[in-house]
Amino acid sequence: MVIDLHAHTAFSDGTQSPSELISEAAMEGIDVLGITDHDTTAGWAPAEEAARVYGLGLVRGMEISCRHEGISVHILSYLHDPYDTGLADVVEETRRSRLDRTHLIIEKLAEDYPIDMDAVLSVSGEDATIGRPHIADALVAAGIVETRSDAFASILSSRGKYHVTLPTIDPLTAIRLIREAGGVSVFAHPRAAMRGLVVSDAAMRQFIEAGLDGLEVDHRDNPPAEREAMRRLAQDRDLIITGSSDYHGTGKPNRLGEHSTSQRMLDKFLDRASTRPGGVDFIQG
């Protein structure tokens, strides 16, 4: 089975609707797909409908924006209760913060480039979690850069003058809220140094001790040597090991199914979620 547990739709920074993504995944031979839009579950319902049509297994998830000691961290929440107020309230606040940050970045960019909020909204999906990828897409549409990746490598670099830090929660809080909502927590691309600073080994141990369920080991942004170190850590601590594409449609070069999760780990995943009050069932294809 090909099990890809990390993909995005136009409800965050992917370029396809949930139905389009599910259709492509089915054509590419994916058996189980995880929908993990940033700070939203808005894509779950249309993804469920499409998964049943195309006979695809669906793991409903969300990628939660966090910050630990000044370092950006993304925690994937799977199979949680979307109506749990603790997690839902925090995520909604993050969505508002993302929008506020977008306005601030645009104000800075407008001093040097012909860019405004209307340009950003014209390239974002309906009800999308607005963020930097949409600013990048607006820069592409304006002919300022060629691709979204080029925008992040230059104008939108976290080290550049247009950067604005996103205020959000600590991963320790996110892990607790995910567990309380019946979900399973996985640290996304934990050693992706190409994106910026990564957390220390001590911080990683803190997350595990706080109840982190798994590590996204097999991801293109984790260097091979780091993957093996994380795999050993996960095995030693009885954590779930996932492999995923982090697919964004045409928004990134990542390919569906380029990394996958084993059936054994998916079973472990589902067992862990089912033992928690409020956990949401896996959608069978």
Image: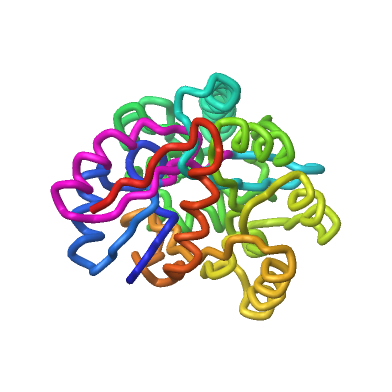
Q: Residue at x 53, y 67 (%)?
A: 219
Residue 30, relative to residue 39: is it above or below?
below
Q: Residue at x 34, y 69 (%)?
A: 2
Residue 111 visible, this angle: no
Q: Is residue 31 magenta?
A: no
Q: Which residues are magenta?
A: 36-64
Residue 225, relative to residue 105: is it above or below?
below
Q: Is residue 6 left or right of residue 85?
A: left
The answer to which quarter of the image holds residue 26 is bottom left
Q: Is residue 142 left or right of residue 276?
A: left
What is the residue that sits farthest to the front in this orientation? 275
Find residue 97 and report its horizontal and vertical position in percent. Answer: 58, 25
Residue 29 visible, this angle: yes
Label total for image = 0
Q: Is residue 47 magenta?
A: yes
Q: Residue at x 51, y 55 (%)?
A: 269
Residue 119, relative to residue 37: is it above or below?
above
| Residue closest to the eye, 74 or 147 | 74
Q: Residue at x 82, y 61 (%)?
A: 201
The answer to which quarter of the image holds residue 122 is top left
Please state, as top left, top right, bottom left or bottom right, where the N terminus lies in the image. bottom left
Find residue 260 and report its horizontal and vertical position in percent. Answer: 43, 69
Find residue 10 and report its horizontal and vertical position in percent. Answer: 33, 41
| Residue closest to the eye, 109 or 212 | 212
The answer to which quarter of the image holds residue 217 is bottom right
